[in-house]
Image: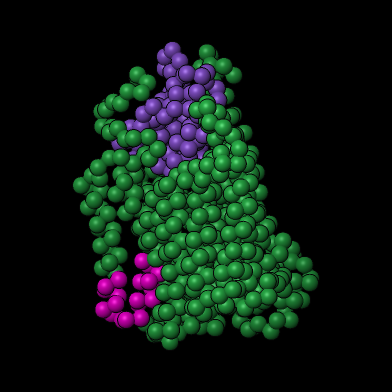
Amino acid sequence: MVPGAASIEAGFAVSKPVSPAGEKTSKSNQWWAFAVTGTFLAISVGVYAANELYVYLSAYLWFGFIYGMCLQYGRFCFSSAYRDLFAVGVPRMFVGIMIATVLFSLTASFVTATGMSGFHPAPFGIHSVVAGLIFGFGMVFSGGCASGSLYKTGEGNMSAALVVLSISITQAVMADLGGWFNKLVPASWHAAAMARGLPASVTPGDGWMDQYLAGYVWTKPKTVFSEMLGFSNDSILGAFLGNLLVGVVAPALVLLVGVYLIWSRKGFMKKRAREGKPAGLGADLAGFWTMVMSSKRTAIAGLFLGIACGLHMFVMTGLRTKFGIENAGEILKAVGQDFGLSVRGTVFDPGYWYVTTQEAQWVGWVFNRVFGVDNMQNIYFGLENGIPNPLFNPADWMSVALIGGAAVMALLHNEFKWKKPTVELATWAIIGGFFMGIGSRLGLGCNIGAFFVRTANGDPSGWLFGLGMIGGAYFGVRFFKWWTERKMAKQMEAVSEIQV
Amino acid sequence: MAMKFEKTGDGTYSLDVKGYVCPHPQLYTKSALSKMKPGNTLRLVFDNASSGESIAAMVDKEGDELLEQLTSGGSYEWTIRKS
């Protein structure tokens, strides 16, 4: 092929460099995109006709749909953010994540300052870093983070679907680990768990996760940057100065400058020198800005995600006020879906974007209803989140719609493609999902619930989880670099003229 | 399907990573380019949309040139010239 020449080969259309999308959307893809959107619309209208309370579930659904569209459009993946830095030296997704986090923090701070935030900080400690490390290691193996695997499932990627399955099963099993695993529980955790006076039905002294939660995690402090600076969290100063500026903008800027100096500056200055332009502070500022804007697609997705996430919190709190409820468990009870409610009558209802708990829940429901496992005796399901029927679980509506939103966006850009995993990819997917499942439960969330949402709301535990993810991604990439070179070496034997 | 890296002519190479998901296409592309001489071209075939953005950014950062991008039904065929 002649370098620089545009050509059209059989079935291929030429697109301009940078964005792989350039074809006109096919009629069939348009039809499927309308069909998927129409299905969600029909569900929303249908359930509303049955009972107005379903608006609460539909709100989760449509925010999930928006998240899916944004994630697919920007190829927004937290795994890629860290992995691509170490693997190929590309910072564009890290930049996108930082943009989205700052913008989400801006909207979240507004919601917090108005007193409409439903966010609760998580206990923080070394466990947040360890959990992030395990999660980060796993997400490199699986090829996508928890939210990334959902949107890639929407692209027709069945390896990603396998990751979702693996992470879901691992969590559901881990939440109910007992028997021999009780021997691994330190006596201090057991004593602390038993002293909490929890309902006997959740057997707090039996189960590794139960004692980890009640005997260790819950003993750790919880705070937000606003309170660390002595402000009330729902004050303007607390929300905007404490949580946004000190808790998010400052650390994000430090990280971005670090990423620029390590991964971006050299290439930018080399290019500038070739064009005969001088170095200096102005050049560095230009280089920094170029890095930030290196992928408009990712930056735009970050912008919309940030706004949608804040709006989501606002809407869910508004709906709780409108319906006079504190938790979706009350809605499920009102519509006759009272199986799987926690001992407190609640279900998992974060009021914002979350991914992994609802994954554990649907498998937990299957274990309980299909295989007869009594998993409501543990704290995670029995006391905190419940295992409602997945067809009526608000958070599951969000995740299913996320997959649908991603599918619609992929269809509109001709990027939807059914892809069956090979044995190799299936193996990585299952291993990756396994580690991410463990990390999620130890960290009480994934890249979204334990990092993105917490960080944006001024919770320092989010940064600790993120720090762990960076470390885990580094080790994961080390492994895959070795694996890639090993496979390339085999191919090299047939390509004798290439310099080694 | 297995990854395939081969010499297709004088200074031209081909890397087929269809079926692979992140991070494999970008890692194989980086590895292939690192083993080629300046001026050589690589015909890269992949079908993982998410890898495209990373590969395009990597090519730009390294000063290599993306000569051509062909797309068809979720498959991509790119030509990259190593700087």
The question of residue A54 being in magenta is answered with yes
Q: Is residue A217 left or right of residue A91?
A: right
Task: Indicate the colouring scheme.
Answer: by chain
Q: Nearer the viewer, residue A181 or A147?
A: A147
The question of residue A192 being in magenta is answered with no
Give the answer, above or below, for where A25 lies relative to A233: above
Task: Work out which quarter of the rendered image holds the N terminus of chain A and state it.
Answer: top left
Give the answer, above or below, for where A94 lies relative to A483: below
For the point 60% across and 53% down, the residue is A253
The image shows residue A448 at horizontal and vertical percentages of: 53, 60
Classified by dominant secondary structure, the portion drawn in magenta counts as helix
Give the answer, above or below, for where A432 lies relative to A377: above
Q: Nearer the viewer, residue B67 or A349?
A: B67
Task: Work out which quarter of the rendered image holds the C terminus of chain A and state it.
Answer: top right
For the point 69% across and 62% down, the residue is A127
For the point 37% across and 34% down, the residue is A17
Q: Quadrant of residue B19?
A: top left
The image shows residue A22 at horizontal and vertical percentages of: 30, 40
Whether residue A220 is visible, yes or no, is yes
The image shows residue A332 at horizontal and vertical percentages of: 41, 80
Rendered shade, chain B? purple
Q: Is residue A475 left or right of residue A165?
A: right
Q: Which residues are magenta?
A: A44-62
Rendered shade, chain A? green
Q: Farthest residue toward the right?
A: A187
